[in-house]
Amino acid sequence: MMTYDRNRNAITTGSRVMINGTGNTGVVKAIHGAGLDAAQVRRSKTVEIEGCEGRYEPIELIRLGFH
């Protein structure tokens, strides 16, 4: 699945991202968006990041690079 970060850069599983506000970085492990439209995915806690606990909203993320 694909969604967009706060700067409207595409993020997918395997994208390297930084969490806005904390500065923590990691790789997107999964995006849980089954049954949601694109706007709901972007504004819901749907993204799991390796090395970070919990889920994050894509608009909280900044893409640093692809796989």
Image (cartoon, rainbow, N blue to C red):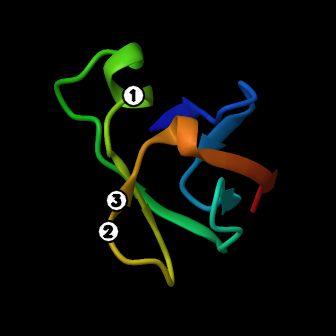
Counting residues from the start of the chain, the first of labels 1 and 3 encountered is: 1
Query: Which residue type does callout 2 highlight?
Result: Gly
Name the outermost residue toward the bottom.
Answer: 51
* Spot occupied by residue 38 in the image (x, y as percentages of width and height): 40, 17
Q: Is residue 59 left or right of residue 9?
A: left
Q: CA distance from mark 1 to mark 3?
A: 12 Å
> Do callouts 2 and 1 mark residues in contact (Cβ within 8 Å)?
no
Q: What label sits on residue 9 in the rendered view?
A: none
Label 1 crowding class (10 Å Cα cut-off): few <14, some 14-19, many 20+? Answer: few
Kindly indicate the quadrant of the structure image that contains residue 17.
bottom right
> Do callouts 2 and 3 mark residues in contact (Cβ within 8 Å)?
yes
Query: Which residue type does callout 3 highlight?
Result: Arg
Q: Which residue is mark 2?
A: 54
Q: Is residue 43 left or right of residue 24?
A: left
Q: CA distance from mark 2 to mark 1?
A: 15 Å
Q: Which residue is mark 1?
A: 43
Q: What label sits on residue 55 in the rendered view?
A: 3
Could you say whether the residue bearing mark 3 is in a helix, strand or loop? strand
* Spot occupied by residue 55 in the image (x, y as percentages of width and height): 34, 59
Kindly indicate the quadrant of the structure image that contains residue 53.
bottom left
Q: Nearer the viewer, residue 55 or 14?
A: 55
Quadrant of the rendering where the N terminus is positioned: top left
Quadrant of the rendering where the C terminus is positioned: bottom right
Count of labels in the image: 3
Looking at the image, which residue is at 62% across and 48% down? 61
Query: Which residue type does callout 1 highlight?
Result: Arg
